[in-house]
């Protein structure tokens, strides 16, 4: 005896033939529906990721917010040295955007474009379809927050910034060493040193970022940084690979 399901299928087939209706492939309909839902879910996820990336970048600690818009196209090349610096920074940006982790160090004279190229790297990453969250932090401004907290003021701002630093994927620490002061360790000899609570704050930061990407800009030489900070801070923040270091030997761009 013919089952009810088979009878219904025959009836549907007859009606489709009589009225010229194209048979419906149920499996294909379900497959298409699942694909639409997958794409919609992926789109929603990317929107959420982009919102989180924007929120993180907007938490940056910088004196002039217009500087956060800087990109590689704005870097003025006047000589071969600046051309080489730009190329190295662009190469680093591509490497980070494709997943490379590690420390990168930009050192050299003030005004040579270290900060501008570091920000350009962040904006290059921000414009890629990746999940990396970027953050720019002025070391001097960060240590102002830490100083206020150390002196008994509300430490909420310092804690919030340290949380952002822990959670971002790519961090620029700008002008490392700028907060140090000249102190005497030997009779008649002044060397730059960083206060103890500053050292502790920096150690907390660098210790939380051992498996992430850090870009440090500084006007100090490697030997000066080693005198200013504890060796553990130096080893966790300063790049060890030659290809991760840009030494800016070009002119002060502010005087060009």
Image (spheres, rainbow, N blue to C red):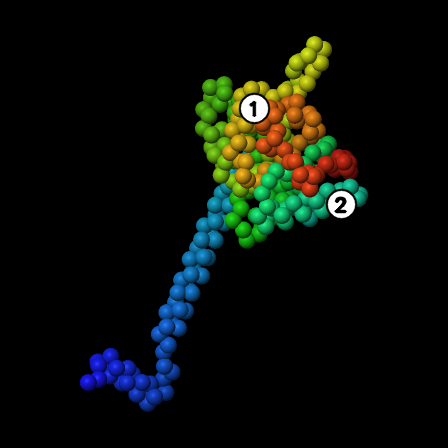
From the top left corner, tell me how far across and down residue 134 is, in percent: 55, 42
Relative to 193, say whether 46 is above or below: below
Q: Which residue is mark 1?
A: 199
Relative to 149, say whether 78 is above or below: below
Q: Are marks 2 and 1 in contact (CB under 8 Å)?
A: no
Q: Which residue is mark 2?
A: 83
Could you tell whether 86 is left or right of 212 in the image? right
Q: Residue at x 53, y 31 (%)?
A: 207
Outermost residue toward the left in this view: 1
From the top left corner, tell me how far across and down residue 78 is, in percent: 79, 43
Q: Residue at x 52, y 49 (%)?
A: 131
Distance between the Cα atoms at labels 2 and 1? 35 Å
Outermost residue toward the bottom in this view: 18
Among the two numbered marks 2 and 1 on one chain, the one whose residue lies closer to the N terminus? 2
As helix, strand or loop, the secondary structure at mark 2 comes to helix
Q: Quadrant of the N terminus?
A: bottom left
Q: Residues within 10 Å of mark 2 (few under 14, many from 20)?
A: some
Relative to 155, say whether 241 is above or below: below
Name which quarter of the figure residue 76 lies in.
top right
As helix, strand or loop, the secondary structure at mark 1 comes to helix
Q: Residue at x 56, y 23 (%)?
A: 199
Relative to 16, say whether 212 is above or below: above
Q: Residue at x 46, y 25 (%)?
A: 155
């Amino acid at each position: 005896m013919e089952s009810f399901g088979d009878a219904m299928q025959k009836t549907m087939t007859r009606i489709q033939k009589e009225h010229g209706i194209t048979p419906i492939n149920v499996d294909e309909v379900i497959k298409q529906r699942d694909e639409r839902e997958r794409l919609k879910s992926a789109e929603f996820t990317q929107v959420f990721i982009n919102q989180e990336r924007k929120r993180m970048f907007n938490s940056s600690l910088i004196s002039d917010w217009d500087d956060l818009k800087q990109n590689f196209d704005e870097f003025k090349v006047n000589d071969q040295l600046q051309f080489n610096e730009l190329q190295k920074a662009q190469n680093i940006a591509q490497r980070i955007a494709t997943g490379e982790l590690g420390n990168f160090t930009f050192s050299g004279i003030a005004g040579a474009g270290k900060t501008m190229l570091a920000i350009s790297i962040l904006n290059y990453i921000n414009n890629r379809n990746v999940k990396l969250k970027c953050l720019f932090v002025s070391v001097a401004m960060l240590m102002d927050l830490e100083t206020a907290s150390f002196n008994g003021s509300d430490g909420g701002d310092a804690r919030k910034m340290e949380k952002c630093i822990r959670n971002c994927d790519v961090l620029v620490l700008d002008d490392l060493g700028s907060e140090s002061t000249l102190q005497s360790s030997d009779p008649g000899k002044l060397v730059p040193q960083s206060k103890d609570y500053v050292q502790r704050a920096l150690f907390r930061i660098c210790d939380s970022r051992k498996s992430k990407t850090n870009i440090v800009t500084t006007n100090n030489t490697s030997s000066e940084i080693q005198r200013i900070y504890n060796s553990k801070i130096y080893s966790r923040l300063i790049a060890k690979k030659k290809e991760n270091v840009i030494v800016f030997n070009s002119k002060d761009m502010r005087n060009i």
